[in-house]
Image: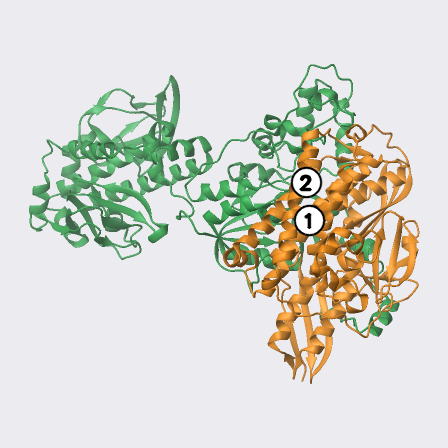
């Protein structure tokens, strides 16, 4: 029986509790089959952290010191678990060094996975990003040092000391010395050794020169470079000594060679990794409390502080979106951050260059627009939809009610015009053949994300010029996005109590300072993203939504409500009217040129990328 | 045998166009300004409410959006039998002139002046090489835009314009600010007109001699379109209602911009030219303002037979100064109490034509309104009128600079420059 449990693990029924948060424990568990649910109680709320399956492990921190469990684990299916305390694990590793190797690999992959989840979290949640960004300047150096000390203190009283490691791996007790500024390895180099810091500090970073971004600093007792040892991939980051440092280098061959003889050494690395895993897992559960850890997982999309290269791409547009950038205050501030590489309206250029950021205004109306758009996408790291046309289609998309032939006929009359040919030939303004000089039009006016991936959207007709500065600041990690909930927040009109019987009023002659909706004049400001200063309602026009739907509206759209439904529900609530009184306004809005009624459900999922 | 030169893009203009030349054995076989913009405003506005239409057509162009809005409101008012007060007309005129100033400053300093100093990076080179001039250019632009912003509450796609009046009320301080801005513009443009000489080296661009054409402008006081020949003699005058009969259009397969011409003269003799040069000939223009006679540069414009196409940008610079003076004149006659837009019964029908001299030339909106809804709309917009002439000028410049089976270096520069001199706005021309 004992043998069977040892080999195949103990069996747990579905619903069985493996351990509870707060209990003391000294064993880790490996899942042989089945699945378990890991949950934590936080502020009286039970929150499921993850579901683990065959091959996963949990409870690993208990291997290093007996401690309180930080989570509750319950089997959700009939499950077999292999329980190991430290002695048992060491014994296993002695018998089969592959066990250590496998464990290390799983640990590293798990850390990478949590790291990725943290990055995602930061990218999608403005509040977390703000908290993370706010730690940039505020961590005092002493706190960082203390952080390192805490790490190495946990190994005090361990049976393995650094001297032991040095002795075993045959490197002199001194290790290798690196001067301040010396590079240990570069991003992209082949990696075949890990390093243990005996003294000093190593800076782990990505990028170089102006683009350098420091991910973390490894201090005494900490490990770096272990990814390469286990996963055989090129170095993910560069390592540079930030002060004179002493390092122990352990090559892959040496590591594997010694594993069988002294598996405790793998333990040292496992412990470091487990610490790191715990740190990032906790950050994932409660990111706001672990802002500094979160920040280390996050990198700005553009690793520069200035000279961000920018292209301005104009498709079929009125040029108003570009025109708002031609104000000298805006332009001067922009040029401090940005190196304008392409803008045919202002500069001669042969072709679209490579750039960090491309802003695209206008709709795809001509085939040539599509060619330009795709080239801009290929040649830019970040593509921004600038203005309502490129985000939603805008006013030109009103033409989509008609077939292309109707548009052409209206403006150009009949397509074959013999008289014109005669006349134009006389003046030497000759006709070309249609095939040779075809100026081709698309069937519809398209928004740009119908064709390419768009990284950010800044809607507006025209968009608020300052928003471009704000966005570039965000992309370079120098600013974080500001909340601008709805247009109403910036409007000078205030709601008043009113018993409305209809919503068919006109904004002309409306009482100043009173909310249009209160006056029975339908205005969409309450569900439209702010940031425009509420120019239109302040100046006597009802909001038509050029900034796009606000967060709550977008969330409803993502869940399947149509834009019309969101409008009707919203107006019903605000104006206290029944549906029959409200729904006729949709027809009125269509006839006045409102353009957002074709917003797609998938747009609702892009919430985190709209500014 | 044939050596085609396709100069891919016309740069430092508004909108998209390719310049296409075909040269064979020292002969220019074809010279084409291939305009590539179109959005279909004439169709998409059909079925829309008449009070929304001007805000929709505003989006034809971000550089002259107020001109489109005012023309639109004028057309709707005429169709529905509504008369705006003189104060409303004056304040609208002030907004349009503010837009002129911003637009001319953009055209002159950002787009064409760089050619004089071989600055392919336009305003960015100007900021390095002549920071004071760049600073003045920005000041002019900012001031012009601020005037539009005070009146319309936003300079690109204004909000406060309405049928019969404005949607907001204005304070005396706001009116004073407009006057102060106009005074700044006057001063700054005077300084530039007097001091720009040294860096402003221009290659003369003569009119293509063999072809007759017609300067077209709109005389607001008389309420008439007027056409003038090359020598400056008035040849035709017609009212807004008769516009459609007098102006016809051609289309070709290689450009999305059409070719308007005077129907009575046929094509090509009915070719048109609108813009600052054409405006010289109407009464009350640059030549009639005594204050402008103080500038020696104005003398170049007095003799019609000595006029050249490159005088277009001189006119623009002078028009900035002239516009500032006109603004001050209008502002004196505005009654704040007569500006509010009235509540209206929109359920009416009719036809109306709105005409505005936009920065680049005459802009015409013709609306047919059926029970408060736009049934049909015809637009002829500034640069559109110049289309044929731009093509002809390209051919002329190419012929003067042909060298075997390609263009000389000077010719290549001139080709790009001659298009810029017209200050084309192609999104307007094609709508």
Residue in view at x 67 percent, y 20 percent: A574
Location of the C terminus of chain A (image quadrant): top right
**CB under 8 Å between callouts 1 and 2?**
yes
The residue depicted at 44 percent of the width and 51 percent of the height is: A307
Which residue is rendered at x = 30% and y = 27% of the image? A12
* Chain of the residue under the numbered disc 1 shown in the image: B
- For label 2, count other residues whose C-alpha is less than 10 Å away and answer few (under 14), some (14-19) or many (20+): many
Name chain A's colour: green
The chain under label 2 reads: B
Q: CA distance from mark 1 to mark 2?
A: 10 Å
Q: For residue A103, which quarter of the picture? A: top left
Q: Write the residue at 88% across / 44% down.
A: B352
Chain B: its colour in the image is: orange
Considering the numbered disc 2 on the image, is that residue within a helix, a strand or a loop?
Answer: helix
Q: Which percent across, then down, holds residue B4?
A: 66, 77
Q: Position of residue A454 (x, y in %)?
A: 54, 47
Residue to which mark 1 is pinned:
B101
Of label 1 and label 2, which has the lower sequence position?
1
Residue A138 quadrant: top left
Callout 1: few (<14), some (14-19), or many (20+) C-alpha neighbours within 10 Å?
A: many
Q: Which mark is residue B147?
A: 2
- Which mark, residue A63? none
Q: Where does the image place residue A247, in percent across and percent down from the top left?
A: 15, 48
Q: Secondary structure at mark 1?
A: helix
Question: Taking A107 as reference, is B224 left or right?
Answer: right
In the rendered image, residues at marks 1 and 2 fall on the same chain: yes
Q: Is residue B307 in view?
A: yes
Q: Is residue A501 left or right of residue A260?
A: right
Position of the N terminus of chain A, as image quadrant, is top left
- Please state the horizontal and vertical placement of residue B374, each as a whole percent of the image: 84, 41
């Amino acid at each position: 029986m004992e043998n069977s449990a040892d080999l195949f693990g103990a069996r747990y029924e579905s619903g069985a509790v493996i351990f509870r948060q707060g209990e003391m424990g000294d064993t880790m568990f490996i899942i042989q089959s089945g699945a378990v649910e890991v949950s934590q109680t936080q502020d009286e709320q039970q929150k499921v952290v993850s579901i683990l399956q065959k091959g996963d492990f949990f409870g690993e921190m208990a291997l290093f010191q007996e401690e309180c469990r930080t989570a509750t684990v319950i089997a959700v299916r009939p499950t077999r678990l292999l329980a190991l305390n430290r002695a048992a694990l060491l014994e296993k590793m002695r018998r089969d060094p592959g066990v250590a190797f496998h464990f290390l690999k799983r640990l590293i992959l798990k850390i990478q996975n949590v790291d990725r989840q943290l990055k995602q979290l930061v990218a999608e949640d403005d509040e977390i990003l703000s908290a993370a960004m706010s730690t940039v300047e505020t961590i005092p150096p002493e706190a960082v040092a203390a952080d390192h000390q805490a790490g190495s203190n946990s190994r005090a009283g361990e049976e393995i000391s650094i001297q032991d490691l040095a002795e075993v791996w045959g490197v002199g007790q001194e290790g290798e010395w690196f001067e301040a500024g010396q590079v240990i390895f570069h991003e992209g180099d082949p990696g075949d050794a890990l390093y243990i810091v005996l003294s000093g500090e190593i800076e782990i970073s990505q990028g170089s020169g102006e683009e350098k971004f420091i991910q973390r600093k490894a201090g005494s007792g900490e490990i770096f470079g272990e990814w390469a040892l286990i996963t055989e991939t090129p170095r993910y980051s560069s390592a540079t000594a930030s002060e004179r440092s002493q390092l122990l280098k352990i090559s892959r061959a040496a590591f594997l060679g010694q594993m069988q003889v002294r598996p405790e050494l793998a333990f040292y690395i496992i412990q470091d990794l487990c610490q790191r895993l715990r740190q990032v897992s906790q950050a994932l559960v409660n990111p706001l409390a672990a802002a500094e850890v979160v920040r280390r997982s996050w990198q700005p999309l553009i690793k520069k502080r200035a000279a961000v290269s920018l292209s301005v791409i104009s498709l079929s547009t009125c040029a108003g979106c570009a025109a708002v950038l031609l104000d000298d205050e805006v332009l001067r501030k922009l040029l401090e951050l940005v190196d304008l590489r392409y803008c045919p309206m202002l500069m001669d250029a042969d072709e679209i260059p490579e750039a960090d950021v491309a802003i695209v205004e206008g709709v795809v109306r001509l085939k040539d627009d599509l060619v330009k758009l795709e080239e801009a996408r290929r040649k830019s790291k970040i593509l921004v939809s600038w203005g309502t046309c490129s985000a939603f289609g805008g006013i030109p998309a009103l033409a989509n009610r008609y077939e292309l032939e109707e548009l052409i006929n209206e403006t150009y009359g009949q397509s074959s015009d013999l008289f014109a040919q005669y006349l134009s030939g006389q003046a030497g303004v000759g006709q070309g053949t249609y095939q040779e000089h075809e100026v081709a039009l698309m069937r519809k006016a398209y928004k740009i994300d119908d064709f390419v991936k768009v990284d950010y959207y800044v809607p507006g007709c025209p968009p608020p010029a300052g928003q471009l500065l704000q966005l570039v600041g965000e992309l370079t990690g120098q600013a974080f996005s500001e909340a601008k909930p709805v247009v109403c927040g910036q409007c000078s009109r205030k709601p008043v109590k009113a018993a409305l019987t209809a919503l068919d009023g006109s904004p002309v002659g409306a009482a100043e300072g009173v909310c249009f909706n209160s006056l029975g004049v339908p205005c969409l400001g309450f569900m439209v993203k702010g940031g425009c200063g509420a120019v239109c309602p302040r100046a006597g026009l009802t909001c038509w939504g050029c900034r796009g739907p606000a967060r709550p509206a977008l969330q409803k759209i993502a869940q399947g409500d149509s834009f019309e439904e969101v409008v009707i529900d919203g107006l019903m609530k605000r104006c206290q009217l029944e549906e029959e009184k409200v729904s006729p306004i949709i027809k009125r809005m269509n006839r006045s040129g409102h353009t957002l009624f074709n917003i797609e459900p998938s747009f609702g999922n892009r919430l985190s990328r709209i500014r | 045998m044939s050596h085609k030169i396709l100069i891919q893009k016309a740069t430092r203009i508004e909108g998209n166009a390719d310049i296409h030349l075909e040269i064979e054995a020292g002969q220019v076989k074809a010279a084409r300004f291939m305009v590539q913009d179109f959005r279909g405003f004439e169709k998409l506005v059909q079925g829309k409410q008449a009070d929304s239409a001007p805000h929709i057509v505003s989006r034809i162009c971000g550089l002259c959006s107020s001109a489109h809005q005012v023309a639109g409101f004028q057309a709707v008012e005429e169709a529905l039998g509504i008369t705006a007060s003189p104060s409303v007309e004056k304040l609208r005129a002030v907004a349009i002139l503010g837009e002129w100033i911003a637009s001319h400053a953009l055209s002159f300093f950002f787009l064409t002046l760089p050619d004089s100093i071989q600055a392919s990076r336009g305003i960015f080179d100007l900021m390095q090489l002549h920071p004071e001039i760049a600073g003045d250019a920005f000041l002019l632009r900012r001031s012009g835009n601020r005037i539009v912003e005070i009146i319309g509450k936003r300079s690109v796609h204004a909000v406060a314009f309405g049928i019969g009046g404005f949607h907001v009320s204005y304070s005396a301080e706001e009116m004073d600010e407009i006057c102060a801005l106009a005074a700044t513009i006057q001063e700054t443009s005077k300084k530039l007109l007097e001091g720009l000489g040294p860096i402003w080296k221009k290659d003369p661009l003569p009119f293509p001699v063999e072809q007759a054409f017609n300067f077209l402008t709109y005389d607001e006081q008389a309420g008439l379109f007027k056409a003038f020949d090359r020598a400056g003699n008035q040849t035709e005058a017609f009212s807004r209602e008769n516009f459609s009969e007098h102006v016809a259009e051609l289309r070709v397969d290689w450009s999305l911009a059409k070719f308007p011409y005077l129907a009575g003269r046929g094509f090509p003799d009915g070719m048109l030219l609108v813009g600052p040069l054409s405006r010289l000939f109407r009464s009350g223009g640059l030549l009639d303002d005594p204050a402008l006679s103080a500038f020696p540069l104005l003398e170049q414009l007095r003799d019609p037979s000595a006029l050249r196409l490159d005088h277009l940008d001189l006119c623009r610079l002078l028009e900035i100064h002239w516009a500032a003076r006109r603004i001050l004149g209008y502002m004196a006659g505005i009654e704040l109490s007569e500006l509010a837009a009235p509540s209206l019964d929109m359920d009416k029908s009719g036809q109306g034509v709105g005409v505005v001299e936009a920065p680049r030339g005459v802009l015409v909106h013709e609306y047919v309104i059926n029970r408060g809804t736009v049934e049909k709309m015809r637009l002829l917009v500034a640069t559109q009128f110049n289309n044929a002439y731009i093509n002809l000028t390209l051919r002329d410049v190419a012929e003067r600079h042909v060298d075997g089976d390609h263009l000389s270096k000077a010719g290549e520069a001139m080709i790009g420059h001659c298009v810029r001199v017209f200050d084309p706005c192609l999104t307007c021309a094609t709508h």
